[in-house]
Image (tube, rainbow, N blue to C red):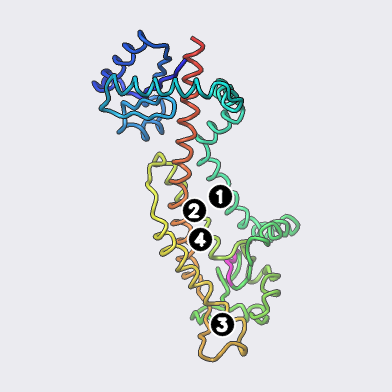
């Protein structure tokens, strides 16, 4: 039997017209008509509301306006195709899989609906744990604090002079090279050479200067902005359209790359040529470039993921509808 799926809305004259034609064809040919009201699922409605009535027959996708001849051609071509493929083992296996809802289908359907909630939970935990490290240190709970620092060590440089501090005299202690007026520098409060990266990573803090967050200033900005945008994306019904890749590159990657990359030479003073400027960024610049990268990244990626999830959900809901029709 050939399945004919129609996406429709009630009270739509074009949909009623095509449904009437399909019922007429059903009296002449052995077909199964699967009706999917796009208003039954928000994402399906968003995807198909400008395309109904939409008819799917085998590999054929028919959009309005269409007539009985158009539908018969697609139905007959699909029937011929099924007859030719009927002896193929792979095709029979594919048909068998299409007649049952697997665990993978159920998982895919669940993820397509709740992936954005899961993402927000993961981001919240990921950005929240680094702030617990200084809280634990301040309350003399050194073991759990050091566990958190160790967990984030592989994904962040954790340099003290590029990190936020809690419970101390200042919120940050920049290198002297940053030339930020009115603040104590990393060198002032530690007596350490800021070119010694190893010491910069190891220094967690003390009761006077406070204790550093387990993620650097830029990473905090990146992941916090990702979380905020992801929450907005979820609250607005995942309707936000994506941005072009060149916006992501130009406004997200390039500023962060320039700000971060231009600091590298400052660790090789006395080695690099005199004509290469030595600079150290500031918490403000790191935060701005981090936010730009975080926002543009999720703004580019999330709509793509959503489109993929809608496709998967549409396919499985159609599969469920066909199976339910067959069982009647």
Q: Is residue 164 magenta?
A: yes
Give me the disc on residue 198: none
Give me the disc on residue 226: 2
Q: Which residue is at 58% across, 46% downward?
A: 122
* Front residue of this view, candidates 138 and 213: 213
Numbered range of the magenta stretch: 162-166
* Front residue of this view, candidates 284 and 206: 284
**Could you tell which of marks 2 and 3 lies nearer the N-terminus?**
3
User: Looking at the picture, does residue 85 appear above or below residue 187?
Assistant: above
Query: Are the residues at dot 4 and dot 3 in contact (C-beta closer than 8 Å)?
Result: no
Q: Is residue 104 left or right of residue 283?
A: right
Q: Is residue 253 magenta?
A: no
Q: Which residue is mark 1?
A: 123
Badge 1: few (under 14), some or many (20 or more) residues near its Cα, within 10 Å? some
Query: Are the residues at dot 2 and dot 3 in contact (C-beta closer than 8 Å)?
Result: no
Residue 310 in percent (x, y) is at 45, 36
């Amino acid at each position: 039997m050939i399945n004919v799926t129609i996406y429709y809305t009630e009270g739509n004259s074009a949909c009623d017209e095509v449904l009437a034609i399909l019922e007429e064809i059903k009296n002449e040919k052995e077909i199964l008509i699967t009706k999917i009201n796009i208003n039954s699922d928000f994402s399906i409605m968003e995807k198909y509301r400008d395309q109904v009535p939409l008819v799917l027959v085998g590999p054929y996708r028919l959009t309005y306006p269409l007539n009985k001849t158009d539908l018969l051609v697609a139905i007959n071509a699909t029937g011929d195709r099924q007859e030719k493929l009927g002896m193929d083992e792979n095709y029979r296996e594919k048909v068998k899989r299409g007649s049952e809802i697997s665990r993978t289908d159920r998982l895919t359907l669940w993820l397509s609906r709740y992936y954005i909630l899961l993402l927000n939970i993961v981001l919240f935990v990921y950005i929240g744990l680094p702030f617990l490290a200084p809280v634990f240190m301040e309350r003399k709970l050194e073991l759990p604090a050091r566990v958190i620092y160790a967990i984030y060590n592989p994904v962040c440089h954790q340099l003290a002079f590029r990190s936020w501090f809690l419970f101390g005299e200042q919120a940050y202690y920049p290198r002297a090279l940053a030339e930020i007026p009115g603040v104590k520098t990393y060198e002032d409060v530690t007596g350490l050479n800021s070119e010694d990266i190893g010491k910069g990573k190891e220094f967690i803090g003390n009761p006077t200067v406070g204790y550093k967050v387990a993620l650097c200033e830029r990473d905090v900005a990146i992941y916090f902005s990702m979380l905020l945008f992801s929450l907005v994306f979820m609250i607005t019904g995942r309707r936000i359209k994506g941005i072009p890749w060149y916006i992501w590159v130009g406004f997200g990657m390039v500023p962060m790359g320039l700000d971060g990359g231009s600091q590298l030479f400052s660790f090789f003073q006395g080695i690099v040529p005199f004509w290469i400027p030595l600079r150290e960024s500031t918490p403000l610049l790191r935060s701005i470039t981090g936010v730009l990268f975080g926002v543009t990244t999720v703004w580019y990626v999330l709509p793509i993921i959503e489109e993929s999830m809608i496709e998967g959900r549409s396919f499985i809901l159609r599969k469920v509808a066909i199976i339910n029709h067959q069982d009647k």
